[in-house]
Amino acid sequence: MKIRFYNAKILTLNEEEKFEVVEGELWTKDNLIAYIGQGKENKEEKWDRQIDAKGNLLMPGFKNAHTHTAMTFLRSFADDLPLQSWLYESVFPREGQLTEDDIYWLDILGIMEYLTSGVTSNFDMYFFPEKNAKASIDCGFRTVQTSGLNNFGGTIEQLEEHYNIVNDMGELSSFILGFHAEYTTSKELMEGVASLAEKYHSPVFLHNAETALEVKECKERWGMTPTQLTDSLGMYQYGGGGYHCVHMEDADFEIFKKRGLTAVTNPASNLKLASGVAPIKRYLDEGIALAIGTDGPASNNCLDMFREMFLTTALAKVRENDAACVPAEDVLYMATTAGAKCMGLDDCDRLAVGKKADIVMIDLQQPNMQPENNTVKNIVYSGSKSNVALTMVNGKVLYEAGKFDIGFEPSEIYAKANAVIGRMK
Amino acid sequence: MKIRFYNAKILTLNEEEKFEVVEGELWTKDNLIAYIGQGKENKEEKWDRQIDAKGNLLMPGFKNAHTHTAMTFLRSFADDLPLQSWLYESVFPREGQLTEDDIYWLDILGIMEYLTSGVTSNFDMYFFPEKNAKASIDCGFRTVQTSGLNNFGGTIEQLEEHYNIVNDMGELSSFILGFHAEYTTSKELMEGVASLAEKYHSPVFLHNAETALEVKECKERWGMTPTQLTDSLGMYQYGGGGYHCVHMEDADFEIFKKRGLTAVTNPASNLKLASGVAPIKRYLDEGIALAIGTDGPASNNCLDMFREMFLTTALAKVRENDAACVPAEDVLYMATTAGAKCMGLDDCDRLAVGKKADIVMIDLQQPNMQPENNTVKNIVYSGSKSNVALTMVNGKVLYEAGKFDIGFEPSEIYAKANAVIGRMK
C-alpha cells in the first residue's frame, strides 16, 4: 500500500528536537513513512491513493499516555458527586459487572473517539488485556497496555502471562509492566512487579501521587511517598513513570530524574475530581520527561488531547503565576514525541523516514487556525477536534472527514455501549 | 421564511428553570420560534425548508458574554510571554494601527469561529462600534456591544453617540453602557458613565477584579475595590456587571447581590494570563447571576464556549476541593439563558414559542456524546465544536455541516486577517 500526501505542510523535528514546518510531500509505504520532502516527479510510482492536503498540516498522531478506555460506558453517568461516592457507589459496582465482551465494544467506542481527536495510540490500564488488545487490533488502532493489578484483582502470575501474551499479539499491541497504585496494592505484589521488571527489563508504571490524601496515607504506612516506596522496592531499574504525579516532594523529583521516569499528566481529570494541579513547570525545569493523558472517560469526560494540551500549559501558568511558563512547543512535544517514548513507541515518535505512519492531518482552513501566526501555538491554544481532517494509524487511514474506516458502523457501537450501561441502570 | 426541524430532541426549560429534553418538532417563522411539540400533520404548511434532525439535539445558541472579537489578528502572535510585555510590547502597539476596515474583516473571522462553536451572539468590547455592528449585521449575526472607553480613547459624548447609533442599527445590533476598567479610567469619565446610565436606564459593564494587582492598586487609590468604587459612583442603578470578577471581597459579593449584577467569567483567559480562578461556587451559593465569555482570541486563544463551560465547572471543583460543586446544569444555564439575560437578550434566552430563533443543532451521533447517559452533562463535560452540526441566528441558518452562509468566502476572510497582521510584523 503506497499513499502520497502532496501540497502538505509537514511538522517535523529538527536536530535540536524543535518543531519545524516544512512544505512538500509525505509518502507512506505499507505501515512506514517512506519519504518526506519536496514534491518530485514520480511517474514510475504506482500509488494506491494520492491525497491532496491542500496546504493543511501533517503531524505525528497524539499519544494518549494514560487512560482507561473502556470506561466510556460511565461517561456522564454520575458526575458532580463527591469523589468517594462517585467511586464506591457508581464506578466500582458497575465495573464489577463488565464482561469481556462489554470491554471489547466499549473500547471500540473509545477508539473512535481517539481517532476524532487525532490520537493514534493509547496507554491503557483496564481489565481483560487480551480482549482490550483485540479491540484495538480489529480496528487497526495501536494500544500499549499496562496492568491495573491490585489487591482486589490479579496475581503476579497473571501479570506475567498478560505481559507475554499481549506483547505477542502483533505490532499494534504491546504491554509494559505496571500496577494500579500503592494505596490499592500490597508490598508483596509490588515486590513481584519489581521482580518481573528485573526479569523482563521492563519499565513500570502506576498511578502516583494523584491526590494529597494518597501521599499522606502512604507516608503514614511506610514513612515514604509512593515514589520513594516504589523506588526502594527496586521498581525502576528499567525506567517507567507515574500517572498524575500531582503531589510531589523534592525527593520524588530527584528519583524521577535519577531513574529517567516520565510524569504523565492528566489535567482535566485532576480538575474534575478536585485532585489538584501538577507542577509541570518544575518537571520541565528539572529536565524530567512529561507526557499527557486524558485519564478515563468517566473522570474527564472526554478523550480529547486538544483540551489536555491547553490545560497542561494554562494550569501551569496560573499555578506558577507566570504567563510565560510551559510554552506551547513543549506541550506539543509532550503530547506526541515524549508520549511515544514513554510508551515504548520510539518508532512512532515523529514524522521521519522509516518511522511508523501514525499521522494526523490538521485542517488549517478553519477560523480557529487563522491567521497563521504560529502553527504550533495555534494547535495547542486554539486547536480542536474539529480540525482533525484525517487520522492514519500504521499506514492505514482510519478516520477521514468525519467517517470511520474501522470495520464497524458507529450506530452498532453506540447501541452496544448504551446496552451495557442500560443493563446496569 | 418557514423552517421545520423534525425528528429532533429539543432542550427546553421547565417552570423551575431546569433543562428538559423533549422529542418532536421545532418550527421557525421568519426570525421567531413558532412551534415546539409533537410532530403533527401539516399538509397546509408551505415550508421553505424541512430539516431532519435525525434524533439530534436542538438547543439555544451559546451567548459569549465577554469578548473582544476583532483581536483575532493577534491569535498565537505573541503567547508565552509575561503579561506586561505581552500587553505593552505586542498588543497595544498593534491595536493602535488597526483601521475601521481591519476591524470589519477581523470581526467576520471571529463571527465564523463563533458559528463553529454554536455561539449565536456575543457581548463585544472593542474599537469602532459602528463598523463592529456592521460586520455582524452583514453576516446575519447578533452582537451586543459595550464601550471600552478609557483615559486613552473616547469621551462621554462619543459614548452617548455610540449608544444611540448602535442601538438604532436594527435587531441584530444593540449597545449597553460600559467602560474599560477602573485602572484605565478617570473618576470623571466613570461619573459620566454613571450619568448616562441614569439618563438611559442602562446597565453598566466593565472589566472588574481580573487580577489581584488591579484590586490592590484600586484600593490604594480609592480605599475601595473596583466594585465598591463603581457602586459608590451610582453606576448600577439599572444593573450591569463585571467581566472576569476573579478577586472579590465579601463586600463586593454583597453589592453584586444588592444590585442584581452579573459576574461574567472568562476561565481560559484567566488561566492563560495567570490571573487566577474565579469563585464560581460562591456566586452560585449567593444567588448571583453568572454568565460565561471567551475573552478575546489573543488571550485565550480561541472562541470556544465548550472549553469555557468545562473550565467553569472543573476549575471550581479543584478550587473548592469539591468534585460535586458547580454542576453541569448550572454551567449550561450560564452559557445560554443567563448570558442572554445579562446581554439584554431576554428574547433569545431559551427555546420557546415566540422567542428569537437563535438555535444550535448538536450532533449526538458522535463518539464523545455516547452513551446517552445525560445529555446536559455530555455537552458540558464532553462536548466539542465538532458536535455543532448547525447554527441558526435570527431564523437563518448561518453554519451547517462545516459550511458558512454569511455572504463571504472563508478564503477571503482568512486572506484579509493574514494581511492585517502581515502588515504589522
Image: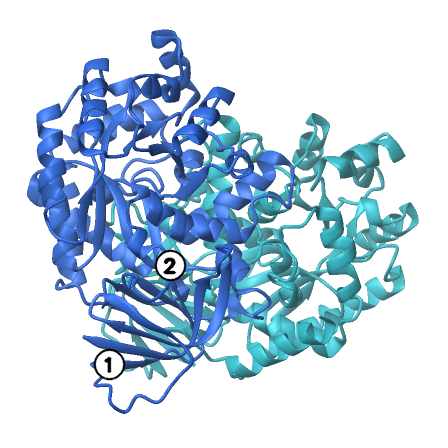
Chain colours: A blue, B cyan
Crowd class of label 1 (few under 14; some 14 to 19; many from 20; radius 10 Å): few
**Label 2: which residue?**
A350
Q: Residue at 48% x, 55% y: name it.
A: A17
Which chain hosts label 2?
Answer: A
Q: Nearer the viewer, residue A6 or B203?
A: A6
Say left or right for B298 vs A412: right
Is residue B29 visible in the rendered structure shown here? no
Instruction: Establish if A313 lies above or below A240.
Output: below
- Disc 2 element: loop
Would you identify the image quadrant in which residue B367 lies?
A: bottom left
Residue A340 in picture, x, y percent from top left: 33, 49
Q: Residue at 39% x, 74% y: name it.
A: B400
Q: Nearer the viewer, residue A230 or B398?
A: A230
Dot in front, 2 or 1: 2
Quadrant assignment for the C terminus of chain A: top left
Quadrant assignment for the N terminus of chain A: bottom left
Residue A133 in picture, x, y percent from top left: 14, 47
Kind of residue at badge 1: Arg
Distance in Å between CA atoms under marks 2 and 1 = 22 Å
Are the two marked residues, 2 and 1, in contact with CB atoms closer than 8 angstroms?
no
Instruction: Establish if A280 lies above or below B171.
Output: above
**Label 1: which residue?**
A49
Kind of residue at badge 2: Arg
Residue A248 in picture, x, y percent from top left: 47, 24
The outermost residue toward the right is: B188
Is residue A41 visible in the rendered structure shown here? yes
- Disc 1 element: strand
Q: Nearer the viewer, residue B382 or B249?
A: B382
- Labels 2 and 1 in the same subunit: yes
Crowd class of label 2 (few under 14; some 14 to 19; many from 20; radius 10 Å): many
Q: Which of marks 1 and 2 precedes in the sequence?
A: 1
Q: Residue at 68% x, 32% y: name it.
A: B248
